[in-house]
Image: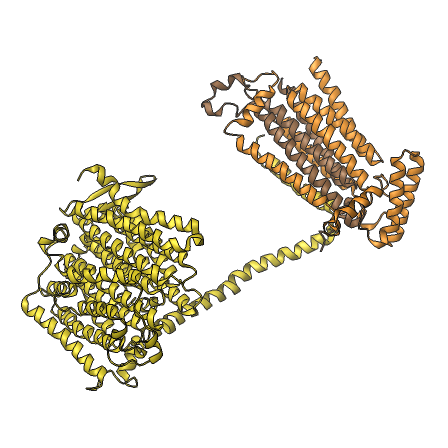
Chain colours: A yellow, B brown, C orange
Amino acid sequence: MTNAIASWLPWAVVLPPLVSFLLLTALGSKIRKAAGWIGSLATLISLIFAFRALTAVSGGATLVADPLLLLSYGDVEVAFGADVSPLSAIMLVVVAGVSFLVHVYSIGYMAKDPRIAVYFQYLSLFTLAMLGLVVSTNWVELYVFWELVGAASFLLIGFDYMRPAARAAAFKAFIVTRIGDIGLFAAMILAFAQTKSLAIADTFQAVQSGALAPNVVTGLALLIFLAAVGKSGQFPLHVWLPDAMEGPTPVSALIHAATMVAAGVYLVAFTYPIFAQSPSAQFVVATIGAFTAIFAATMALVQTDIKRVLAYSTVSQLGYMMLALGAGSVGAAIFHLTTHAFFKALLFLAAGAVIHAVGTNDITVMGGLAKKMPVTAAWFVIAAAALVGLPPLAGFFSKDAVLASTVPGYPAHFTAAVLTVLLTAAYMGRVLWLVFFGEARDAGRHAAAHEAPLVMRAPMHVLGVLVLVAGAFTAPWTGPIGRVFGALGEVAHAPLWMAGLTTALGLLGLGFSFLCVRGAIPCPLGDPTRAAYRLLEERYYIDWFYERAVGGAAALFGRFAEAVDRLVIDGLWRGIADALIVSGERADAAGGGQIQRYNAVALFALVVMLVVFALSMKGV
Amino acid sequence: MTPSELMQYLLFSAMLFVLGLFGALTRRNTVIVLLSIELMLNAANINLVALSRFLPGGAENARLPHPSLAGDFSATLGQTVALFTIAVAAAEVAVGLAALIAFYRLKASPNVDEMDSLKR
Amino acid sequence: MSGGTLAFFILAAFGLGGVTTMLTARRVIHMVLALSLSFLAIAGLYVLLGADFLGVVQIIVYTGAITILAVFGIMLTPHGGLETEPKSAPRQGRRMPLVAFLLAAGLFAVLFWAVAGTRFARSPFASDEPVDAAAIGGLLLSSRYLLPFEVISVVLLVALIGAIVLAKDDASDTAGSVQAEEHAGTSPAEPPTVRADNAEAHRADRTAASARDTGESGQHVEKEAQLVGAVREANRE
């Protein structure tokens, strides 16, 4: 790879969405129809260059582009550069690829929306921010794109801003992820304070050379992890992700399943040199990941909104990735991130097609849709099987890689992860049986259901094929793809007994949920009046706690601060103001409203000041 | 020009200034008040032009510490700033007289006494 | 005493004399003419200071435009043409010439002290050569002063538009300009909206103004104007 190509290739990946964003901003609603194609084309160009970058770095090299923007404040330099390492190359391809497919799908899905141009504008902004985040070389650049991703997510969740629920969800997502963003900001400050440089590479070097105290390294790692927890919806900041499903379904597929929520995982993987030096931080990552995996899976069991089930599933799967990172296997985490991006995006796109067809998110009123929408149903079943981890689909390999990575040293985490497989199978089975099989529970909706148009089906086909083959991505015979995964480090291969165990548990869960839905056996969670069901339905009362306790405390503090402001601070100033007004009124009574008299008073003041000034000048 | 000549000019402009000020404070007719203010501006202009005579002239500007400062401290600059003042003064008179016309329409009087709306 | 100094004192005498006449004159039009003499004298001082271009601008703008504008302003706002007030001055019109004089004198004292107490040192590179108008133009068009130069032209434009908007008759906005033109045709000096209680005094005002304009004897006009002032006072009571 010559330097000439390296200098521009990363930018060629990042910048096309910027062009389409600016184009759509400028042209706006004049090009309703073309907006989707402009966005799609820009993302396709990004995807092509991302592939080129992937092949270029498959040997393990890193592309270093010329910085586009170089700011310097005194000795501090902030370079907006772009590096593509094997890790970021994979992420670039995943982001650009899923983004492209979602763009195409959205052309069909959003066709009837009057604000379609705005939608694609936001989508372009998101793609730009996400690609920029992946290639960032500098803490400031990283932070800018990190926030930009959050802003785009906010805009897209609240896209349907006429609905109060969408507005509330957008605010919730923004505020909750901001808690995590504070972590990244603090990490940036800490890194700068310790190394006097904002370049991420300098921080890595300082960490690896042992220049930083172990406590500082752990603090840095935990602050970064806080940001990842916020973005990736890990416990205890997972509450925003299910609500984010208020956004359009393709957005859920792109942002809240495949890419943005994976940004947290990517961030931890990207800054892994820091985590690698801190075993305690790694343990925290693994524990939060494992707990989130099983915790979110339980909540998915009782949701009736198809997108919410998928959202909790996403949280759970992201927990897997964090677990793998905590256990020290970047390769397994990124492998699972990639396959998850494919099958979860496919699940969302298929769910979007279903929602598009029946006009509701509620799985309890669906049923028997496999007959009406055979293609969608087939892909949904395949993606669900991949999520459960059945061979030979992508999820089987990546999930087993995650599980295998935890075997040395993390037995408790391993147990939780294996149990999660069973839960995953149970909730996905429930959705499958309720939506696609059995009797139609709403005849009217069922009759109106139809297969999605080609522009929506085509991206599903592509993702479906990827779900079928992505399991082989780590195999050496896949050429550059295999090599680039190899560059991330050895991906543990599950022993046969483990593959058998997870497959058996997956089948058990599916079968169990089938019997449950059919009513053949009593469901442990089938009765909405039972306490356990209520607990899950109410999401362990965590949202309630945040709203009442945290929100209440904040409101209380706000009221206190307001009272202080009103009584003490305002009182002070109002006293001064009142004194001035009273004295002004006195003076005004003397002035009589005459301009010239006012002028005379001003002149008097000027003369007095000049005299005082003259007298105060000594020796003149 | 000697320092004593400069002081003649400065004292003359000070007299013009205070006389204009006195006029602005005591005359009733708004037009005269406006013209008195113009007189004060003129006094300031005389100061600018007279004082700038003590600054380096055009040709010697080449000796300034930096070429970009050429013309910045010169008689030319003093007169240019005075020119700016005249432009602003002209704008002021135009607006002032227009305001007078509008005021006259309201109160049927050109006198400053009537401009007492400042009192609540 | 050199020729320059002599010229300075003559011009300064004219300048101060004009201002003093302005302060003591009784008729507004005389005041304006006296001030135009001061402006002319200041133009002469500019020439004496080597600011030829500025002197010409001073004559055009001050003695020309602004004085004429002021005369128009006086004619458009007829008030008997007198500066001094009638004997029965209204309460709010009470002058305070003594206070103003003391303040002005105080300011002059400070200025005098400042000028007299400062030692002025002339730059060795200073010259008494007149400044070329082209040099001023060059400075205005140099990169450093181009923006202020452009801004000042915008200020003038804004002032022009603002003056039109301010002086424009609001009533003619809706009633149509035809009516306003008719109005102006019969009596250019008449303000369209006059408070009822002032209407009569105002009519008398107008008579006085037109009489003055057509060149009737000043004495007569003056008397009538005083009468008008009395009528106005009566109306106000």
Q: Residue furthest top?
A: C2
State the image coordinates of residue C61 (x, y, percent, origin top left).
70, 29
State the image coordinates of residue A40 (x, y, percent, origin top left).
32, 53
Residue A466 horizontal side relative to residue A361, left or right: left
Q: Residue furthest left?
A: A496
Residue A262 horizontal side relative to residue A394, left or right: right
**Residue at 50% across / 63% down in the picture?**
A565
Depth check: give the residue in front, A103 or C56. Answer: A103
Q: Answer whether residue A224 is visible to the viewer in this image.
A: yes
Instruction: Establish if C165 lies above or below B73.
Output: below
**Viewport quadrant of the C terminus of chain A:** top right
The quadrant where residue A608 appears: top right
The quadrant where residue A551 appears: bottom left
State the image coordinates of residue A352 (x, y, percent, origin top left).
31, 67
Instruction: Establish if C126 lies above or below A388.
Output: above
**Residue at 17% across / 40% down in the picture?**
A1
Q: Answer whether residue A607 is visible to the viewer in this image.
A: no
Depth check: give the residue in front, C94 or A199. Answer: A199
Instruction: Establish if B60 lies above or below A42.
Output: above
**Residue at 30% across / 60% down in the picture?**
A455
Depth check: give the residue in front, A296 or A257. Answer: A257
State the image coordinates of residue C10 (x, y, percent, origin top left).
75, 19
